[in-house]
Image (cartoon, rainbow, N blue to C red):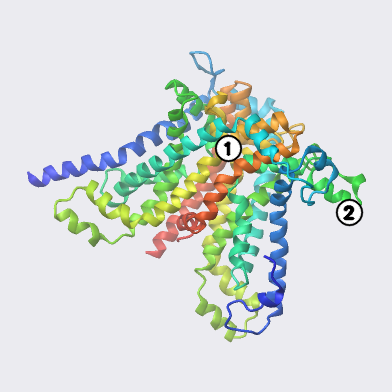
């Protein structure tokens, strides 16, 4: 009887501790997540009391009749690929350099990391000013170099605007990859490095056969986080170009937002969201499986 | 940062041999760091120039005279008193409250046998990976249903909900690594889980909690997309929303615009520089443990 009582008690205690998090997470994160799926099969302007079920109509529309969707889709793919290559690569190079015993490396690390803590909307505002065609930083630098006649309209030119936005994102996000790689480099066995040095391996050999294999888990994590963060690209585009000019920097996350919150077509916005969600799940689930396998192997 | 390469070649003081590769590396890293800092210099210089000076002087020319009034003007026109205090109220309530709720849940999931506990953890872990932008519209609908648009609870509760996954994930890993002996004796002595959580687990996890606190403070301070949807009334705006609107209205007042950016960015920067050590450990403790 006594045992039973305390068991019941522990259960009550458990739910008391878990309760607030589960309730808030359930209401404000899980429910909207499910609701967006439901909404994608409905037509709704956000005001009506009734949400009309329309089946796959919203999906048919975004795939077949909405030209912006495919532009946003293409831009999201380009953006994701850029995010997979550059921030991790530059971050790795910086981390390898700053892992050496160098004078003032603490200051250098802090410098590279500083942009990460700046609000992305502030980064956007800052860079919009730097891209100012007349008095902005880049135009001034080009004028100083005697190239005043070939200054592009950085954010107004649809062929380069997306890449200009990406450069701002690169400046903003490299420090994040760098810190993860620096942490990963701590797990590289110094004994192995010494041993391979004695065996006559040069800098490249040590990197190729000791450092790189030890960094494998870190590399996977950095790549997955880069993909996830790249799909979340919203603030920086919203703040720098708002998706323009002529949708040339439009992305899925921003287009979903625009459809729902500005055009008031919640159903179409939700359908775009679901597409983005499916892409994320397709990337995340294999990663989760992989981590689980790693953990089981470690046990 | 003004150091000669001769100094740099004695990295740890134990060796005096100059390694030319390391010197070259150091120079390269410093040069790139200067590029990384250049936007800050440009922004701070501009924030202290009058519009005439912006047009007449080069990007990296220090202001001919300091136009401090840019800051006072930007503060007034950008309604910084309102947005600043809104941001402060939201962050100062959200961060401790959210962390407490996450820590409680992490303890229960890590140290008590909860039915469906494992599945629950997986659901929470999944939450760390979904882009929350996909559900801005249903989130708006949900908050609207509770009649909480343009209120502090209406933004704080969703912020907590989206902070829970990462924090539970990190704290769960940390709590599980605490030796069983530490809590078992107390349990046998009849202590409740509340007591064990408060008296044993919270004290030993202060470094992790501090790291998460800094991380979460900066994230909350910087959040834009959710605030854009949930705070429609200007009197409820947070700093990022205020900055966005400032850019829309006064983008040709270069000095003031840059002063506004500096004022928005400064608090998070100060917090980061003060607690840098915790910040980085918080970021990496979750990600790179495996």
Above or below, A95 relative to B250: below
**Disc 1 secondary structure class:** helix
Q: Is residue B86 left or right of residue B116?
A: right
- Image height of A155 relative to A104, above or below: above
Q: Among all residues in the image, which is located at the extreme top?
A: A49
For the residues bearing labels 2 and 1, Cβ distance under 8 angstroms: no
B270 relative to A75 in the view: left or right: left
**Residue reaching furthest left?**
A1
The quadrant in which the N terminus of chain B is found is bottom right
Res. A109 in view: yes
Q: Secondary structure at mark 2?
A: loop
Rendering quarter of residue A122: top right
Q: Quadrant of the C terminus of chain B?
A: bottom left
Q: Residue at x 50, y 74 (%)?
A: A189
Closer to the observer: label 2 or label 1? 2
- Rendered location of residue A73, percent (x, y): 67, 37
Query: Residue B256: which quarter of the image?
Result: top right
Q: Rounded to the nearest whole Å, what is the CA distance between mark 2 and mark 1?
A: 43 Å
Characterize the local packing of mark 2: few (<14), some (14-19) or many (20 or more) Cα atoms within 10 angstroms. Answer: few
Q: Closest to the observer: A7 or B75? A: B75
Front-most of residues A162 and B41: B41
Residue occupied by mark 1 = A276
Residue A164 x %, y %: 75, 45
Outermost residue to the front: B65
- Seen in the picture, residue A252 relative to B198 is either above or below; the reply is above
Residue A215's disc number: none
Q: Quadrant of residue B251?
A: top right
The answer to whether B2 appears left or right of A294 in the picture is right
Label annotation for residue A145: 2
Q: Chain of mark 2?
A: A
């Amino acid at each position: 009887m006594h045992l039973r009582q305390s068991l019941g008690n522990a259960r009550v205690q458990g739910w008391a501790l878990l309760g607030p998090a589960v309730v808030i997470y359930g209401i404000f994160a899980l429910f909207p997540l499910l609701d967006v799926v439901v909404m994608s099969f409905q037509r709704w302007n956000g005001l009506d009391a009734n949400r009309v079920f329309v089946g796959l109509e919203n999906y048919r529309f975004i795939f077949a009749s909405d030209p912006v969707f495919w532009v946003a889709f293409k831009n999201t793919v380009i953006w994701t690929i850029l995010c997979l290559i550059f921030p991790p690569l530059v971050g790795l190079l910086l981390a390898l350099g700053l892992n050496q015993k160098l004078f003032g490396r603490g200051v250098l690390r802090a410098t590279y990391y500083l942009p990460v803590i700046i609000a992305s909307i502030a980064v956007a505002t800052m860079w919009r000013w730097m891209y100012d065609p007349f008095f902005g930083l880049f135009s001034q630098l080009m004028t100083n170099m005697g190239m005043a006649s070939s200054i592009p309209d950085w954010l107004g030119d649809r062929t380069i605007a997306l890449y200009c936005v990406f450069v701002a994102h690169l400046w903003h996000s490299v420090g994040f990859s760098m810190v993860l790689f620096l942490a990963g480099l701590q797990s590289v066995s110094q004994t192995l490095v010494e041993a391979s040095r004695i065996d006559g391996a040069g800098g490249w050999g040590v990197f190729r056969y000791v450092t790189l294999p030890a960094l494998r888990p870190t590399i996977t994590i950095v790549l997955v986080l880069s993909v996830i963060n790249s799909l979340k690209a919203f603030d920086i585009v919203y703040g720098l170009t708002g998706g323009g000019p002529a949708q040339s920097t439009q992305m899925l996350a921003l287009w979903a937002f625009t459809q729902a919150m500005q055009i008031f077509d919640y159903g179409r916005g939700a359908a775009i969201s679901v597409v983005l969600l499916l892409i994320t799940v397709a990337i995340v689930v294999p990663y989760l499986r992989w981590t689980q396998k790693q953990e089981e192997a470690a046990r | 940062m003004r150091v000669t390469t001769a100094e740099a070649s004695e990295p740890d003081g134990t060796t005096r041999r100059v390694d030319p590769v390391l010197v070259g590396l150091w120079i390269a890293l410093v040069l790139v760091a200067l590029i990384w800092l250049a936007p800050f210099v440009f922004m701070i210089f501009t924030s202290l120039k009058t519009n005439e000076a912006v047009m007449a002087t080069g990007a990296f020319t220090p202001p001919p005279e300091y136009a401090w009034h840019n800051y006072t003007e930007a503060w007034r026109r950008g309604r910084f008193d309102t947005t600043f205090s809104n941001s402060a109220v939201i962050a100062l309530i959200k961060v401790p409250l959210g962390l407490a709720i996450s820590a409680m849940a992490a303890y229960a999931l890590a140290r008590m046998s909860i039915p469906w506990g494992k599945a629950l953890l997986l659901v929470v872990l999944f939450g760390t990976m979904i882009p929350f932008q996909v559900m801005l519209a249903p989130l708006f609908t949900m908050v609207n249903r509770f009649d909480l648009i343009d209120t502090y609870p209406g933004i704080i509760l969703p912020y907590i909900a989206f902070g829970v996954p990462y924090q539970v994930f990190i704290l769960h890993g940390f709590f599980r690594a605490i030796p069983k002996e530490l809590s078992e004796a107390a349990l046998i002595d009849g202590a409740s889980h509340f007591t064990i959580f408060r008296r044993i687990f919270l004290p030993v996890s202060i470094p992790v909690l501090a790291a998460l606190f800094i991380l979460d403070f900066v994230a909350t301070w910087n959040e834009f997309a959710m605030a854009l949807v949930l705070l429609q009334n200007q009197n409820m705006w947070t700093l990022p929303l205020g900055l966005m609107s400032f850019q829309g209205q006064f983008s040709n007042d270069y000095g003031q615009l840059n002063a506004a950016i500096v004022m928005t960015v400064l608090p998070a920067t100060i917090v980061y520089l003060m607690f840098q050590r915790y910040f980085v450990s918080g970021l990496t403790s979750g990600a790179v443990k495996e």
